[in-house]
Image (cartoon, rainbow, N blue to C red):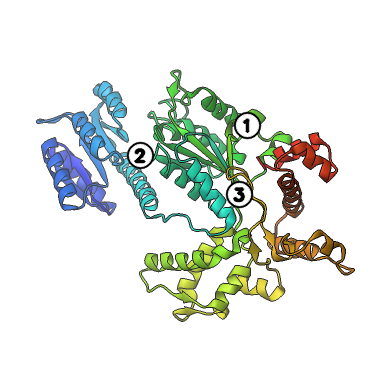
Amino acid sequence: MKPIWIVDDDQSIRFVLEKALLREDLPTRSFTNTREVLAALEQADDDEQQGPQVLVSDIRMPGGSGLDLLDKIKAKHPGLPVIIMTAFSDLDSAVSAFQGGAFEYLPKPFDLPRAVELIRRAVDESQREEVSEERMVAAPEMLGQAPAMQDVFRAIGRLSQSNVTVLITGESGSGKELVARALHKHSPRANGPFVAINTAAIPKDLLESELFGHERGAFTGAQTMRRGRFEQAEGGTLFLDEIGDMPFDLQTRLLRVLSDGHFYRVGGHNSVKANVRVIAATHQDLEQRVKLGGFREDLFHRLNVIRLRLPALRERGEDVPALTRHFLQVSARQLGVEPKRISDAALAKLAAFSFPGNVRQLENICHWLTVMAPAQLIEAKDLPPEVMAAAAEGHVTEALVPATTTAHPLAAPLPAITERESVSATTASEATEAPAGVSSWESGLELEAQALLAAGRTDVWDVLSRRFESRLILTALGSTRGRRIEAAQKLGIGRNTITRKIQELGIE
């Protein structure tokens, strides 16, 4: 870990902090004035030497103030946490420190355990920022040759010069945050921050403060003002993951921000302007959540400006080999070992697996194989138990092929169809002449239902019904060149019904 830099002209303060941090196994480096610090930072940048993990600075020193030092550091190292030490009588300077971007201020004389705990929090924050930046730099372009993924890529390209709000839907583990990062990376806000928050992972009582920040004294324990995620994402993109789980009362506050671009910190009386692009994601059916009263309809329409549906991995089986090889390379780099190769037989079994956990599950399997496979060449017998059990029981999905009807790139991609369903392979006359018993498309439906049931899903009816209805409507619209009334007549349903279904299914 990089050292904690301590800047103070008082030798006793430096000594006390050094000893306390050393007991916590936190390395330190001390300076007596701001000139020394700036020279050391410049040298660290030029020679690519180790800079500070956290900087703790007195506010008043001979040769330069801590606030001036803060300004210069934030200009070149905006992610570096800076803790300003100040006397109780110097609260005006403390306010200035926060306005300049300080992580926290430490009043003198300070309680040593509290000071160490504060520095430890700053270290944790710094390391989280480093991991986030590393992921942003190291993340490869999204992989996918399947038609449904190509639709997603085209949509990202079309949205590259837009700041419009986007709603990403897809099952858990399908890569919704990767899509959000790609939208940010290829947008006019690419030079701004990308801030992500999982609204389902934070307790309701803390989520409001996490999003909007709080003022000092807003609640018990709020000893200082804190900026929320909206302020942290200023000029960039805020990614709200699992938006369907946001508490109802907070949905009202979010709607207000999206409507007028202003918000209030918890306990605050002055509005804060938010220059932020919002991208939301969910694995839930928000239309159904609206009907059940769990999600505000007006917020849904605010978020649902452009909707991108990310396909499940089982809908793009042809991408499994490339993703597998990529994740094996990543796992090897992380573990510092030679990358393992995988046989065609093992790849075939993986491609046939239903992947209820989607791309995230495949990534975990590749980590497992990197550690557990006995040889450099992964054979089919080396695959993890869940894959082998599914193959043995026949709970696998059919190989997927491109849909034959093309939807608008910004609409939900067509549900993938199996080879048995392929409309290019079976004409209407052949369908009527099929032998008695189960038809080919019904067999495909049965296999898909088996795979979902084997994965423990409890929404099989909804999933398959939506895919069935989507396919019927899209096929009819394709035959009528998008004329809804004519498509409804061909399907034998009313024009109000087809309009409602198009909205519910997210077809446009």
Residue 2 in view: yes
Identify which amino acid the numbered label 1 is placed on: His
Q: Nearer the viewer, residue 312 or 284?
A: 312
Residue 49 image position (x, y, % from top left): 18, 53
* Residue occupying image coordinates x 47% and y 55%: 142
Find residue 337 and report its image quarter: bottom left
The residue that mark 3 highlights is 170
Structural distance between the alpha carbons of marks 3 and 1: 18 Å
Residue 168, horizontal then vertical, whole percent: 57, 44
Q: Is residue 156 left or right of residue 410?
A: left
Q: Which residue is mark 2?
A: 191
**Proximity of marks 3 and 2: CB atoms separated by less than 8 Å:** no
Front in this rendered view, residue 203 or 428? 428
Q: Secondary structure at mark 3?
A: loop
Furthest residue in direction left, as rendered: 63
- Amino acid type, callout 3: Gly
Image quarter in which the N terminus is found: bottom left
Residue, far top: 269
Provide the secondary structure element on which disc 2 rests: loop
Is 37 placed left or right of 111 in the picture?
left
Q: Residues within 10 Å of mark 3 (few under 14, many from 20)?
A: some
Q: Tag 2: residue type?
A: Asn
Going from the N terminus, do you reach mark 2 or mark 1 first? 2
In the displayed structure, 222 sits above or below 160; it is: above
The residue at 54%/53% (across/down) is 150
Label tally: 3
Mark 3 and mark 2: span between their CA atoms?
27 Å
The quadrant in which the C terminus is found is: top right
Visible in this render: residue 109? no
Quadrant of residue 12 within the rendered picture: top left
